[in-house]
Amino acid sequence: MEDRYSLSLQQVNGLALPLGLLLLGGGTWAYAWRHGDYISGLAWERWLWGLALLLPAIPLHEAIHAAVARYFGAEARFGFDRRTWTPYVHVQTPLRVWQYRWQAAAPTLLLGVLPLALGWLTGGPILYFFGLIMCLSGLGDGIVLWLLRAAPADFWALDHPSRVGCQVFAQRPEAR
């Protein structure tokens, strides 16, 4: 059993904060460079609608994790950490590492990268910044994917019982 594929929530947040500031600053600069002054051209009501889209996107992000895990035959349970106000999905049955990677990446790809790219191509600031914020919300998943980069794809991954990430096994472990 390998425990090096997980971090405490505090460690993940400590890594995600500077990465998030870089992503937000760089993404904002890149959009302004490509599309010009975007803030003064939008009414504040449109920005409020954009922010309102984020509320259902947070549980949708977690639902996509669960849907992909279930697609691969795993059981998933929703939860909420009251101490850190963090929603999560806990995959309770083992997945192959390659499947675990897909379930970790899917929400950020669908809700983050796709709208970000469409907003960039079309010049739509609400779509772009929605995608940017959803990429920020997927930084924890990205950190887990980075931790898993050297794990053999055909090994088994099982969510860590108390940390962000998973444990990796050569043989299929029991479900939790």
Image (spheres, rainbow, N blue to C red):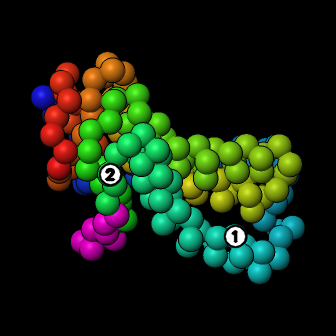
Q: Is residue 80 magenta?
A: yes
Q: Is residue 167 above or below residue 128?
A: above
Task: State yes or no: discs 2 and 1 in contact (Cβ < 8 Å).
Answer: no
The residue pinned by badge 1 equals: 50
Q: Is residue 152 above or below residue 137?
A: above
The residue pinned by badge 2 equals: 75
Q: Amino acid at mark 1?
A: Gly
Magenta span? 78-85
Please provide percent x and percent y for residue 92.
Answer: 26, 50
The residue under the point 87% across, 67% down is 41
Please provide percent x and percent y for residue 64.
Answer: 50, 54
Q: Residue furthest left?
A: 1
Q: Which mark is residue 37?
A: none
Q: How many marks?
A: 2
Please provide percent x and percent y for residue 52.
Answer: 64, 76
Viewed as shown, does residue 99 lie left or right of 169?
Answer: right
